[in-house]
Image (cartoon, helix red, strand yellow):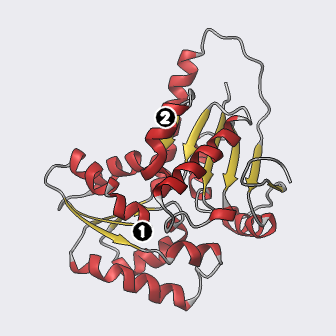
């Protein structure tokens, strides 16, 4: 039985989660909302991010989804508890699955975390890692320029390498053996990050960890619904953005390597323009 999975991010970063979930669950349907009008979320205040997250969730739930994935670390850090207490469908963030994977990967218990300024300042990763691995040494680094680099399609230019090198230098000095990418945009810089941090450091991709968690939640949903007769759904993939669908479509097609369906422009108040 197929389900409909909704996910939102501030921009294109959540596509890294979508790709991994689709790889594990190719028969399911996906509704993606990129809040590009408000990107990036990282520099914004907590209350603003929570408000955006609630609006995004309402929009996706109105599309008839069965499961909501908050494919944004900043939104997961600041709004996940509120979303879980507000909506009746399962809501999954990207933080907990990634933390579990990082704690399993490390041998030295020296873990680096990179993310937006809001995510790092929330201390959500530091607290979550210590909850799983009490004596871990966690070194967190905000990388506020990474998301604009990706959204503005500068990820393959030399300036991106220089910025990555500058941000990662303190983590290299701490001799970490595991680096958790605390933003779903950051896997789009994976090659540069790996080259600069060193081949001996394990990089934890939050998208992969989140996809595995989604697959587990689907099993639970199907178990709960096994007595219910439901019509078969046609597999579909729909993309919505709150600004500039052309740029989003171009970036998404380069990322996936194949044409995407039309990207639909919606207003931040969730009504079609």
| Quadrant housing residue 111 | bottom left
Residue 95 in view in this figure:
yes
Most foreground residue, 92 or 59: 59
Q: Quadrant of the N terminus?
A: top right
Q: Position of residue 35 (x, y in %)?
A: 66, 58
Q: Check residue 84 in the rendering and tell me which mark sits there, or answer none.
A: 2
The furthest residue to the left: 135
Most foreground residue, 12 or 24: 12
Pointer 1 local density, CA inside 10 Å: few below 14, some 14–19, many at least 20: some
Mark 1 = which residue?
Answer: 117
Most foreground residue, 257 or 60: 60
Pointer 2 local density, CA inside 10 Å: few below 14, some 14–19, many at least 20: some
Q: Secondary structure at mark 1?
A: helix
Q: Position of residue 139 (x, y in %)?
A: 25, 67
Q: Position of residue 66 (x, y in %)?
A: 63, 30
**C-alpha span from label 2 to label 1:** 24 Å
Tell whether 195 sits left or right of 35. left
Q: Which comes before the other along the chain, label 2 or label 1?
A: 2
Q: Position of residue 163 (x, y in %)?
A: 46, 85
The furthest residue to the top: 227
| Quadrant housing residue 173 | bottom left
Residue depicted at 80% across the width and 60% down the height: 259
199 lies above or below 26: below
Q: Secondary structure at mark 2?
A: helix
206 lies above or below 232: below
């Amino acid at each position: 039985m197929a389900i409909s999975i909704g996910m939102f991010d501030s921009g294109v970063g959540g596509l890294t989660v979508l790709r991994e979930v689709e790889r594990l669950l190719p028969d399911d349907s996906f509704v993606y909302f990129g809040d590009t009008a408000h990107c990036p979320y990282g520099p914004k205040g907590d209350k603003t991010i929570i408000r955006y997250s609630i609006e995004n969730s309402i929009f996706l739930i109105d599309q008839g989804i069965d499961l909501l994935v908050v494919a944004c670390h900043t939104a997961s850090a600041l709004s996940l508890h509120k979303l879980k207490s507000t909506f009746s469908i399962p809501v999954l963030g990207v933080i907990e699955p990634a933390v579990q994977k990082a704690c399993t990967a490390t041998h030295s218990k020296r873990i680096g975390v990179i993310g937006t300024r809001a995510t790092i300042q929330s201390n959500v990763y530091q607290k979550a890692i210590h909850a799983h691995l009490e004596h871990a040494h966690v070194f967190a680094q905000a990388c506020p320029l990474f998301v604009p680099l990706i959204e503005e399609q500068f990820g393959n230019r030399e300036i991106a390498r220089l910025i990555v090198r500058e941000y990662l230098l303190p983590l290299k000095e701490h001799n970490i053996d595991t680096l958790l990418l605390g933003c779903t945009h950051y896997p789009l810089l994976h090659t540069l990050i790996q080259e600069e941090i060193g081949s001996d450091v394990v990089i934890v991709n939050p998208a992969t960890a989140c996809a595995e968690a989604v697959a587990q939640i689907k099993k639970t949903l199907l178990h709960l619904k096994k007595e219910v007769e439901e019509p078969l759904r046609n597999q579909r993939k729909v993309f919505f953005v709150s600004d500039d669908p052309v740029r989003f479509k171009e970036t998404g097609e380069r990322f996936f390597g194949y044409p995407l369906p039309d990207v639909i422009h919606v207003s931040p108040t969730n009504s079609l323009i």
